Image (cartoon, rainbow, N blue to C red):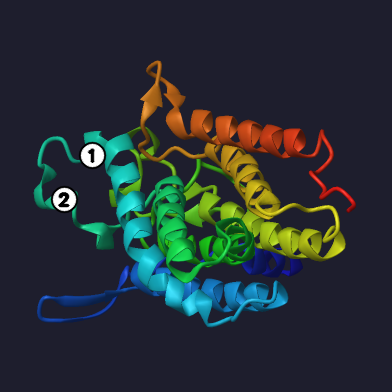
Amino acid sequence: MSDFLFISLLSLPSPPSPIIFEAGPFALRYYGICIALGIAVGTWLTARQLENKGYDGTLALDSLFFIIVPGFIGARIYHVVTDYDLYAADPFPGVFEVWNGGLGIYGAVAGGFLGAIAFSWFRGISVLDYADAVAPGLILAQAIGRWGNYFNQELFGRPTELPWGIRISPDNRPVEFADATAFHPTFLYESIWNLLGCLALLWIARRFVDWLRPGDLFLIYVSLYSVGRFLVETLRVDPAFLIGGDFRGNLFVSSVLALVFAMFLFLRHSRPANKTADS
């Protein structure tokens, strides 16, 4: 009996319908709620970080008008380009049906960063300071937003007998795993990694304040997230763009970004910072 209760506490309940309620053509989905909640919490944390740097915290809210649209477009473009096989047979309106899932975080970061550059120029602040302030809130938003994949029954891993395996309905299982019922909840693994990454970035920002240079925290964020993404990708079995026929493309992207950004951080600190000469 005790073993049954222990396993029950560890187990994830099967995802409910992805739709909360419908009214005519309008449907409120858990996926959108998770993304909106992630943006709200991430914005709040970014405001706190900006205040710690001596900026007005309301800049975080103002920046949303510059960041959300290009970030959203970048996220969708990355997904559609890298997973175009999902839409090739009937691309329209499928490529626009974002409410069914399909946002690439690397595209979101790239698009959002372009928006951040425009916002920083418009408001006359340092884009590197702003990027550092955004980093903890961004990875926290990702941790929350990943739960949208739970409700959509997507981005799960290979079959598992672990007690916390998630049960996926037959319609959402890959053909080769049609007989399996429980799968690794890779969305949960990534969410936990991102939450820990947020805490790590906040600790680094406080503990190494005298060592960090503008932009360093954002470099650490990209590298740290990419390490976790690489590990999660080794478990995932959902459709993905492939390199060489069987190598998941996101494994390549995440490994390259983790190494490149870590190396850039190392090179920045391999030589002393420029200091103004004494007069």
Q: Please give the name of the residue rendered at 47% of the width and 70% of the height, measured from the top-left corner.
A: 123
Q: In the rendering, at what x and y percent does residue 236 appear?
A: 49, 40
Q: In the rendering, at what x and y percent does residue 26 appear?
A: 16, 78
In the image, which disc is placed on residue 94? 2
9 or 241, nearer to the observer: 241
Residue 27 shown left or right of residue 205 in the figure: left
Three-letter residue code for mark 2: Gly
Residue 2 shown left or right of residue 7 in the figure: right
Three-letter residue code for mark 1: Leu
Residue 184 shown left or right of residue 259 in the figure: left
Q: Tell me, yes or no, whether the two marked residues, 2 and 1, touch with CB atoms within 8 Å.
A: yes
Quarter the N terminus occupies = bottom right
Residue 16 shown left or right of residue 165 in the figure: left
**Which of the 4 image quadrants contains residue 100?**
bottom left
In the image, which disc is placed on residue 86? 1
Which residue appears farthest toward the front when viewing the image? 279
Q: Is residue 19 visible?
A: yes
